[in-house]
Amino acid sequence: MRKVIVFLSCFFFALSSQAASLINDTETERVITELITPLGKAADIPDGRLRVHIINDNDFNAFVMGGEDVYVYTGLLKQIKSPDALQAVIAHELGHTIGGHMAQMADRMNAEFKRTMLIQALGIGLMALGGDPSMGAGVLAGSSGIAQQSMLAFTRDEERIADDMGVKLMMKAQLEPNGFIEVLEQMEHMTGALETRINPNRINHPLTAERLNNVRAKIEEIKSGYKPINAPTDAQRAEYELVRAKLIGYLDSADNVATTYPNTDKSDGALYARAIARMQNGNLDDARVGVMTLISRDPDNPYFYELLGDIEYQLGHYDDSIDAYEQSLKVIKGAAPQIETALALVLTERDKTGDKERAIELCKRSLLSQPAPLTYWVLARAYEDGRADWARAEYYHLIGKDAMAKDYAKRAQKSLKSGTPEYIKAGELLK
């Protein structure tokens, strides 16, 4: 979907100056959510409350906010090769939440801020009272360092506790705790040489070697009868590999895709990554051959049809693109807001009788499960009256352009009948 990709790229770049961009992808979100759901239950998070957000960033990172929103970086997903290791990372992050570390961190930061201000006031006072200026300056310069050392020691302790609680959480969820060893070994391979030259008191995490030893000791304490009965199934492992391949295909360079998945690799993941990369580079015919091979192997995979829809759209084959998206929605389990929006876009492009009505229906359904700027943008294309201005207002509001949002909201209210849902929603944007 060249137009969609171009649009989304512009959208991501527009956000980059404000915050890291988020990727909305039905397949990735579903697979990761399914993998971490046992951890959510073990952490006593109500069903359906654990939400996954994918951050488009190459950092090897993840974090949890508010106890229920899990943010995972694409860099982490691309590099971690097993779902067990990914579960260990999320268990560690949930360990912070269970331990109340974020609240403690805020309290500690507040306390250290006050302490720093007090020390700085002492330094300024010495200088103002006509004492030794160098003494006052020295106290002033050292104050932030004292607070920093205190905070670093605090965060190192919290990381150790989070590892410990994460292992316990993995066991409570009846998952494979050796995922912790796997991810820490990978981290040690990535940073081990650098850490040998680092002062361990100047970083906010314990050295990886220390964490690895601690986790190994903790896992050795597990009773011999323990069985990880909720460990990822073979099907889940295959799905996770497809998600990794998808992200690499979309986000990495063609050279890196070719290195990671050479032509000699005939696995589903390799075919998926190469098909996506070829589509990205305009080699649409070869991309189509690749995805058709995947469909022949697994005709019930909805995301292969989604990719076929993308490719057919770029080829200008609107009918075939719509058929592929419709098949994707037919076999998919659960909500699929991104696929619904993509299908709605192609329908507005084809614009046969009934297409725009179907596009509006799809956009409304998509917005019920996940309000997104692109969906409102497509909805504006489908409407042919004042509701289009309301949809544009919602689009601009979501991307942070409030002046434009208010302008379109005013236009919408001028043309819409008072009391209609869109009129009322436009009014809410004007408050």
Image (cartoon, grey):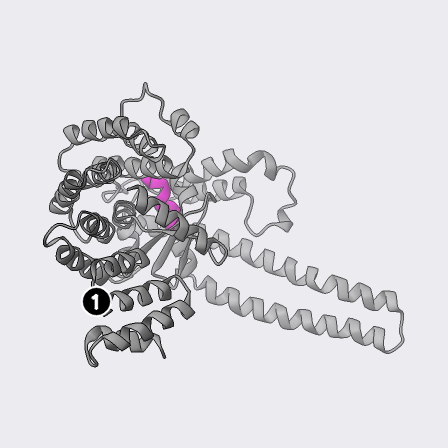
Tell me where residue 77 appears, x and y as whole percent. 38, 41
Q: Position of residue 223 (x, y in %)?
A: 32, 43
- Please state which of residues 309 and 353 is positioned toward the viewer in this rendering: 353
Where residue 57 appears, as percent x and y from the top left, is 45, 46
Instruction: Give percent across and percent down for residue 429.
Output: 34, 74
In depth, the one of 261 and 134 nearer the eye is 261
The residue located at (55%, 53%) in the rendering is: 156
Residue type, mark 1 in image: Asp
Does the segment drawn in magenta span residue 86? yes
- 258 w.r.t. 408: above or below: above
> Main SS of the magenta segment?
helix
Q: Quadrant of the C terminus?
A: bottom left
Q: In the rendered image, which quarter is residue 109 located in? A: bottom right
Residue at coordinates 87% horizontally, 68% vertically from top-left? 133
Reading the image, the residue beneath label 1 is 385
374 left or right of 343 in image: right
Q: Is residue 120 left or right of residue 269?
A: right
Query: How many residues crowd mark 1 within 10 Å: few (<14), some (14–19), many (20+)?
Result: few
For the point 48% across and 38% down, the residue is 187
Q: Which residues are magenta?
A: 82-90
Question: In the image, is residue 384 above or below residue 318?
Answer: below
